[in-house]
Image: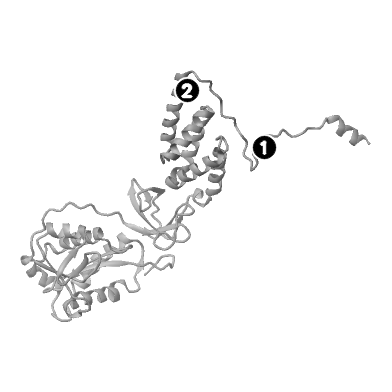
Amino acid sequence: MRDGSGKRVKVYFFTMVLSRSRYKYVYHSLTPFTASLAIYAHIKAFEYFGGIPTEIVYDQDKVFLVNENLGDLILTAEFKAFCQAMPFELFFCRKADPQTKGKVENVVKYIKQNFLYNRPFSDIATLNREALEWLGRTANGMPHAVTKEKPKDLWLIEQDHLLEVPPYVFNEPDPVYPVRQDNSVYYKKNLYTLPEGTYKGRGTNVTIQVQDDELIIKDQQDRHIATHEICFGKGRVISNTDHKRDKSKNLDNLMLNVAVIFPDSDKALMYLERIRKEKPRYARDQFLYIRKCVDRADVDSVVKTLGYCIDQEIYSARDFEAVMDKHLKERQDSGQKMTEVKQVSLSINKKIAEITPATSNILDYERIMKN
């Protein structure tokens, strides 16, 4: 499939078909199916069918099955828990055995050649909505090539033999969208920009939530990336000028500026680098807070705090402050003299940074100009 900008979009789908009526269901995703997503697709299929079949035949897929040891099925933990809560029986096809799964294989081919073929892609929610319309209008509304009857008509009879869907608590996953190479995401026929560096290669995806006419865009670890007002037009680029700035260089400079105020700046730089790795989205705030802590402390407390945090693998500005406050209190209670941390200008050579440049007398320049 291709989106409105002409970019190719890879789509995955889950399908289920009732054996007698050929009544079909399909659910699409922009990411490969996991056990959780497959379970969600099952629940949506049962809702669409109005019940659960007494037996479901599966292909041997790693989403469902870890191994088939001479007939002893070893299911994935999540899928096993789901099956135990459901009333249907499981049957897994043998590998390379098309006769036992021919009906669903035909549905897969039908979806690819009839529904997905040459269909423009807008977003995954729209695609799933269009799929339901296609199911009702064509896949389940037109006479089947074998039965010569409409699947929808036979489903009305078959529905009486379906099992009741038991209550099962399962949260709907947030829709996932691929990040483009230009650090943008395509949503409902418009492009929304993302910060520089968001795209990490193929497989970079984000989730989008709609709240009060705004798009909240987060990464796969549920960390906030960007917020945009929803655009109700088509073919537009909704950008944030701040997203085009490469902030890495400014962050490098800030990290160096903070490191040089430590007595052992090399050790401090290693510590700050680790904080940057642990909290990439909040590195700037972390560095600024640590600089604020060091500015109010003495040399001995700064040295001890940095050493303790490195030894104990404490990589948080708030925890750094707590350790420093402990050392400051100990020094105050002991009556030791406090030696302030000397502010050092940023330079590759510290000795050069502390040199005061020579100055010339203005009268020398006046004499030169007169001559």
Q: Residues within 10 Å of mark 2 (few under 14, many from 20)?
A: some
Q: Which mark is residue 351?
A: 1
Quadrant location of residue 149? bottom left
Q: Residues within 10 Å of mark 1 (few under 14, many from 20)?
A: few
Mark pair 1, 2: CA separation: 30 Å
Give the structural element (helix, strand or loop) at label 2.
Answer: helix
Q: Residue 326, image x and y in percent?
A: 42, 27
Q: Is residue 260 left or right of residue 137?
A: right
Q: Residue at x 7, y 62 (%)?
A: 163
Residue 7 or residue 61, whichever sits in front: 61
The reply to whether discs 1 and 2 touch (Cβ–Cβ < 8 Å) is no
User: Of the residues shown, which amino acid type is indicated by label 1?
Assistant: Lys
Image quadrant where one finds the N terminus: bottom left
Q: Do we see residue 121 in this rendering?
A: yes
Residue at the spot of label 2: 331
Q: Amino acid at mark 2?
A: Arg
Label at residue 311: none
User: In the rendered view, does 40 fall on the left or right side of 177?
Assistant: left
Point out the residue furthest to the left here: 160
- Looking at the picture, does residue 242 appear above or below residue 122? above
Image coordinates for residue 19, horizontal then vertical, percent: 13, 73
Is disc 1 placed on a helix, strand or loop? Answer: helix
254 shown above or below 62 = above
Name the spot of residue 68 as percent of width and height, x first: 19, 69
Q: Is residue 227 visible?
A: no
Residue 25, image x and y in percent? Answer: 20, 67
Please say which color scheme the image uses: one colour
Above or below, 326 against 83 in this view is above
